[in-house]
Amino acid sequence: MKRMRLLRLGVWALLACLLASAGTSAYAAEQKQALFKVTLSATLTKEWTFTRIEESETDCVRTTRGSGRWQTKLSSKTAARMRAIAVSNGRVRFSGAVVAALAGTAARSGLMTTIAGGPAPCERFSRTARCGQERRTFRRASASVASPRRGILRLGRLRGADSIRSFRSTCLEEPSDIRAIRTDLPLATGPLDSRDVFDPNVPRWFVTGDTEQVTTLEGEIDGRVTERVRWTLNFTRLAPS
């Protein structure tokens, strides 16, 4: 009787393994894929204001107030080919998930006011400088595309566009704490509907990410930074290959 019980357990274990193997094979056979041409357009905006007050031992006071605006606009010059693959739990994985051939322009401008005062013999003056727009261009930049979790599409950081950070104007001051806030594509995520991805009756669809974030600075410099990121990925379905 003991031997018969062991034999039955062995049969059930073998049957379970066969069922699991069959399920895996069926999933692999039914795994959905779709091929697309993908283009990207985006606008990144960063605006800031700050106040810095410096006081000397002789009670002389210098107040610096500044405001600035930085904006980058970019778009695809050539469509990327990208394959979407259905994975577990309704998620989507992208193969070849890079939009390249991105080109665009960055511009920066602002206003600086300096006020000095205090008891004699402190220097007293008030100066305002309107800093004209500076521009930088870039070509052949790229960004990755991923779906980190179900229903979400995220872009990676913009690569190959170092010039958009290279402003060094002596007119427009950008304090280090503000300069360290590097507005970029990942700030915004977009909704991803797998039904659009794998429905052959949907020849074209798009995903848009749009967000705004405000950072307040306190300490030696009081300031406020507002970041806005908006991007659109356009997908055009291709015949399977």
Image (cartoon, rainbow, N blue to C red):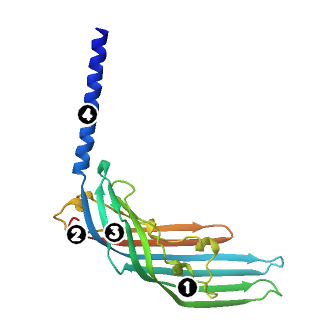
- Image spot of residue 70 (x, y percent): 51, 80
Marks 3 and 2: CB-CB under 8 Å?
A: no
- Image spot of residue 157 (x, y percent): 47, 68
Dot 3 falls on a residue whose secondary structure is strand
Residue at mark 1 to residue at mark 4: CA–CA distance: 69 Å
Q: Is residue 182 left or right of residue 58?
A: left
Residue at image location 53% in from the left, 78% down from the top: 162
Packing grade of label 3 (10 A; few <14, some 14-19, many >=20) is some
Residue at mark 2 to residue at mark 4: CA–CA distance: 37 Å
Residue at mark 3 to residue at mark 2: CA–CA distance: 21 Å
Residue 10 figure quarter: top left
Q: Which residue is mark 3?
A: 208
Q: Which residue is mark 2?
A: 238
Dot 4 falls on a residue whose secondary structure is helix
At label 2, the amino acid type is Leu
Q: Which residue is mark 4?
A: 18
Decide which of tag 2 and tag 1 comes sooner along the chain. Answer: 1
Residue at image location 31% in from the left, 16% down from the top: 6
Residue at mark 2 to residue at mark 1: CA–CA distance: 46 Å
Decide which of tag 1 and tag 4 comes sooner along the chain. Answer: 4
Q: Nearer the viewer, mark 1 or mark 3?
A: 3
